[in-house]
Image (cartoon, rainbow, N blue to C red):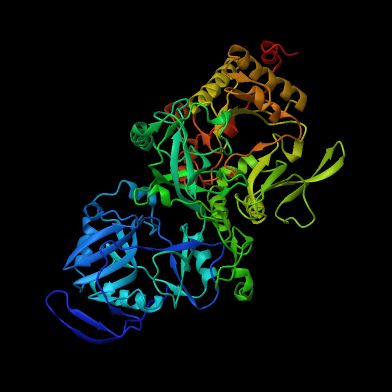
Amino acid sequence: MARAKKVAISDRKRAGAAGEMRLTLAGARPGALPAVPQAQLATLVKHPPAGDGWLHELKFDGYRILARLENGRARLWTRNGNDWTERFPAVATAIERLDAQVALLDGELVAQLADGRSSFQALQNAGIRSDLRYYGFDLLHLDGLDLVGVQQDARKEALHALISPETGDSSPLQYSDHVVGQGAEFFRQACGAGLEGIVSKRLTGRYRAGRSTEWVKVKCQREQEFVVVGYTEPAGSRQDLGALLVATYEGEELVYRGKVGTGFSAETLRRLHTQLRPAERKTPTVGPGPGSGARLRGVHWVEPQLVIQVAFTEVTSDGVLRHPSYRGMREDIAPERVRLERPAGAADAPLPGVKPVAQTAEPSRKPRRETEIGGVRLSNPDKVLYPERGLTKEAVAQYYLAIADWIIPHINGRPLTLVRCPQGHTGDCFFQKHMGETDSPHVRRIRVKESSGARDYGAVDDIAGVLAVVQLGALELHTWNSRSDNLERPDRVTLDIDPDPTVTWDDTVQAAYEIRALLGELGLECFVKTTGGKGLHVVVPLVRRTGWEEVREFSRAVVATVAAASPDRYTLQLSKSRRKGRLLLDYLRNTRGATAVEVYSTRARPGAPVSTPVSWEELRRGVDPRSFTVETVPARLESGADPWRGYGAVRQSLTAPLKRRLGLR
């Protein structure tokens, strides 16, 4: 990032520990330090502003703090006017060491992770910790001079001159650096590094309390604060509460925005329930809206007092959040100030002086970067495919390269169906069953007879083939249960355990154990893996002696036997209306042409989950399927944790005595 130049100083004389500055800053005027300062806020837009008239800073994931220094004593104020000095004494002490008697800084207080990113969730439990940082990004007052009328770039120069001589890398007080121009490229790099986004500020802008278009923000994913208006009862193994109902204000009315049911730890659920229970009321504070009918019966309504931070992929046309996830509590924001942030940009009326990136020739002048991974050319490797994790196409390719030895024995030679998401999992995704004319030469073609005629499927035999489908934007690899050298003889059975949303993980695990027990009685060894979602797959390796019809009838008989013993818990019916509160035991993955998500395949879902093998003992002890991701699975395998190590050595088939025990001919 570009470092700001030092401010012009006409005279600087030491006066005690602090000293004085007489600054030659146009627009500065004598003025008193405000008792409770008010913050300038950024407007959410779709694209960074183009041109050299803007500076761009990283958007931090923490608490907005205005630091007020007077007579050598610092006070830390939230944007809601709360004094949080006692919470963060190390930051206050660092500000008190500045060479000034009176100052007003604007910045963000963050908990900094080891990789340099800030984490709002880590900040929730912050105490006196060495990883807390206050990043100052503006200077509004200095030793009797009111600087709000000074241009943005000059204020930052003055701030840099004040902070930098006094601080080192380990100090809780840091200067927030910036770049001038190159907004689109800066934003791309921020998202690629897994950061929250950027804030762009007009170089010539003056500081104005409240929201304005002199400051704009662009986020790598949607995230903002919401007011809690109710909660649901917990289900299954969850304790204290199920989901939070949230809303935002439109004028003086609260508008329902949906339920937030993920992102909680057990301790967070307990703490939220403790706070919400005393605030319960009999009637809702939200007006009629999506989901406000029968689906909200039995909700505990609460006074709109608690504000939380929520990440989500989008707001639907009905105004409800899609894929919301809890990030933390926002004690620094008053509920009545919470509004739904609607990005402005190309599809909206243009902001004064803010042009969408598409209107500038800057991006088209720069060719897209290409790279080579595993011998395969990867175009646009910086394309963010999992924005909530900042994971790019290159990161997905590196994941597959790291686990090549584990995925290839399972996937090689099998007809593929891909789920392609060229714009990432939050964009438009589509299934691709057949090969097209422009597909990669690393993907082998298989001619398959179908009812409508012979068609070409794709198959991969090595890691280059897997990387080639990543280049095509594939985020899911689904395969047949047979291989190209003997398509009519399956070499595995896949039994899919698909829970209704109300079914607990423990019940899903229990279903897998009951299937395993029956298979064990039949003398068959089986393996288990997560699906990358809420379900499990029980997989039975076979010697290739049996045709599709026999395998289908066998798999149906197995799940039917298990379901008959507990009809209130299990069903074989695909209809969702018949699956409420039960687990679907799906045997139809074992028909010719049907597919199941392959072992170690990524999924096009938030968090970059992976369909991951687990051991039966591991499943018994308790695993969280969400913990198996692109970021965690390689290290798991490298540590020696390969629960399917003996899979390839299993030799078993569907014998006549075995089938008779299931009532099959």
Quarter placement of the C terminus: top right
Q: Position of residue 451 (x, y in %)?
A: 86, 36
Q: Is residue 216 above or below residue 421?
A: below
Please state which of residues 583 and 273 is positioned toward the viewer in this rendering: 273
Residue 645 appears anywhere in the view: no
Q: Position of residue 43 (x, y in %)?
A: 49, 62
Left or right: residue 99 compared with residue 608:
left
- Image point 35% across, 49% down: which residue? 122
Residue 502 appears anywhere in the view: yes
Left or right: residue 570 compared with residue 590:
left
Please state which of residues 487 and 377 is positioned toward the viewer in this rendering: 377
Q: Position of residue 143 (x, y in %)?
A: 22, 75
Quarter placement of the N terminus: bottom left
Left or right: residue 516 compared with residue 618:
right
| Quarter occupied by residue 114 | bottom left
- Image point 19% across, 66% down: which residue? 96
Outermost residue, bottom direction?
A: 10
Q: Is residue 417 above or below residue 99?
A: above
Outermost residue, front direction?
A: 252
Outermost residue, left direction?
A: 16
Please state which of residues 354 and 396 is positioned toward the viewer in this rendering: 354
Q: Is residue 555 above or below residue 18?
A: above
- Image point 59% across, 69% down: which residue? 357
Please state which of residues 51 and 438 is positioned toward the viewer in this rendering: 51
Q: Position of residue 128 (x, y in %)?
A: 23, 52
